[in-house]
Image: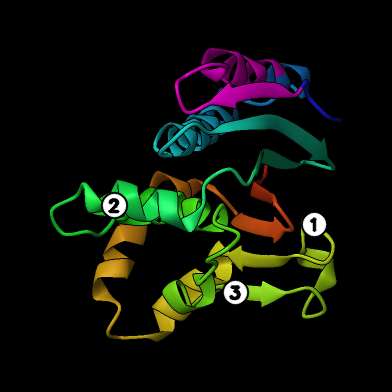
């Protein structure tokens, strides 16, 4: 099953339609009230991710389901470059992305960096969580892509006793508590965020 594709922007266009699509999908698949709430919360978190992006950003959102496994997709194309990002960050006193706190903030920062084709320093900036096509092809949302995996990141944080702040962020995150997996896949100029959730 695949839902309608909803066009969303970081200015709020399509947000209410995306939330309605989550509700309609839950009703169509006869989810329990609790599971319906979880699907809506995951959609809200994904919309929050879009709204936090800088510049003019547009994306497509949809939900797919197979055998109880729900995948929430957010697909966008590269429009920001490293120079645009540098100019935006120069307006901050620290010159750094102060919003990159918490799991959602880190995801937003990772997504913005993914949209910088000329300056992708992602594996240096977020060294934990990266896997590549050929490592586990069945886990990749997009063929021939490089991909950041939340589960891989979480495992790295758990194993590192110095990552106290990161662990605290995971403990407080709605996404971390509800989602089974979050992937950010990069393939050419296309970036795809996928949230996985299995409802029994």
**What residue did someone put label 3 on?**
130
Looking at the rendering, in which quadrant would you find the N terminus? top right
Disc 1 and disc 2: Cα gap in Å? 30 Å
User: Viewer-proximal residue, 19 or 100?
Assistant: 100
**What residue did someone put label 2 on?**
89
| Relative vertical location of residue 23 with respect to residue 81 in this rendering, above or below | above
* The magenta stretch spans residue 58: no
| Relative vertical location of residue 180 with respect to residue 71 in this rendering, above or below | below
What residue do we see at 54% from left, 27% from top? Answer: 40
Disc 1 and disc 3: Cα gap in Å? 14 Å
Quadrant in the rendering for residue 103: bottom left
Q: Is residue 41 visible?
A: yes
Relative to 151, 28 lies left or right: right
**What residue did someone put label 1 on?**
142
What residue do we see at 43% from left, 31% from top? Answer: 51
- State the extent of the magenta-drawn residues as a range: 5-24
Residue 154 screen position, x and y as percent: 47, 70
Closer to the observer: label 2 or label 3? 2
* The magenta stretch spans residue 15: yes
């Amino acid at each position: 099953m695949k839902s309608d594709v909803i066009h969303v922007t970081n200015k709020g266009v399509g947000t209410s339609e995306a939330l309605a699509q989550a509700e309609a999908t839950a009703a169509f698949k006869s989810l329990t009230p609790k599971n319906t709430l979880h699907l809506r919360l995951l959609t809200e978190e994904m919309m929050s991710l879009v709204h936090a992006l800088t510049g003019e950003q547009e994306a497509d959102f949809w939900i797919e389901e197979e055998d109880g496994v729900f995948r929430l997709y957010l697909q966008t194309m590269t429009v920001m470059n490293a120079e645009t990002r540098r100019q935006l960050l120069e307006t901050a006193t620290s010159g750094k992305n102060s919003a990159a706190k918490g799991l959602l903030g880190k995801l937003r920062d990772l997504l913005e960096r993914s949209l910088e084709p000329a300056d992708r320093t992602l594996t240096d900036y977020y060294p934990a969580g990266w896997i590549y096509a050929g490592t586990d092809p069945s886990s990749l949302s997009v063929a021939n892509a490089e991909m950041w995996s939340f589960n891989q990141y979480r495992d790295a944080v758990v194993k590192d006793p110095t990552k106290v702040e990161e662990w605290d962020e995971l403990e407080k995150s709605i996404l971390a508590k509800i989602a089974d997996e979050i992937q950010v896949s990069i393939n050419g100029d296309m970036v795809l965020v996928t949230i996985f959730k299995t409802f029994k």
